[in-house]
Amino acid sequence: MQAGDTSSLEVELLASLEHGSGVTHVEFNRLGTCLGVATESNHVHVWRANLVGTWQVVSVVEGSADLAAGRAGDNEGQPGMVVAVD
């Protein structure tokens, strides 16, 4: 297989995670042990797999409509909150 050739890769569904609204962004941490999911309802769900591989929510952060619209008040366009999980 040459670089960039994905024709021989296989896809396997490992889990289907419920969020209650549409998902707008997903991102794993550097180790691939945590998954952050942003939703249309201005929530960020942080998921982590347990020892048997079942994904569980470890945190839910609720954002505000002002932050979602880019109106961060005194922060002049800066994010109102940064969440990092390693």
Image (cartoon, grey):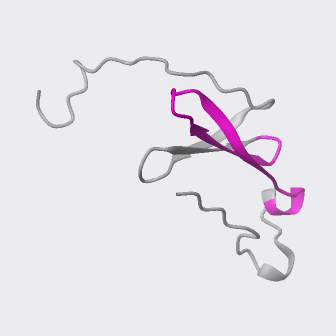
Query: On screen, 55 above or below 42?
Result: above
- Residue at (72%, 26%) from the top-left corner? 18
Query: On screen, 22 above or below 37?
Result: above
> Quadrant location of residue 12?
top left
Residue 20 x, y percent position in the rendering: 81, 29
Residue 55 x, y percent position in the rendering: 60, 31
Q: Is residue 44 magenta?
A: yes
Q: Work out which residue is located at the far front of the displayed protein and give it.
A: 51
Query: On screen, 68 above or below 43?
Result: below
- Residue at (15%, 37%) from the top-left corner? 3
Total count of labels: 0
Residue stretch in magenta: 40-67
Q: Nearer the viewer, residue 33 or 12?
A: 33
Left or right side of 56 for 14: left
Q: Nearer the viewer, residue 59 or 67?
A: 59
Q: Nearer the viewer, residue 69 or 82?
A: 82
Residue 63 x, y percent position in the rendering: 82, 56
Left or right side of 5 for 13: right
The quadrant in which the N terminus is found is: top left
- Residue at (41%, 50%) from the top-left corner? 31
Q: Is residue 9 magenta?
A: no
Left or right side of 72 for 50: left
> Quadrant location of residue 57?
top right
Q: Nearer the viewer, residue 50 or 11?
A: 50
- Residue at (51%, 33%) from the top-left corner? 51
Query: On screen, 81 above or below 69?
Result: below
Q: Work out which residue is located at the far left of the displayed protein and give it.
A: 2
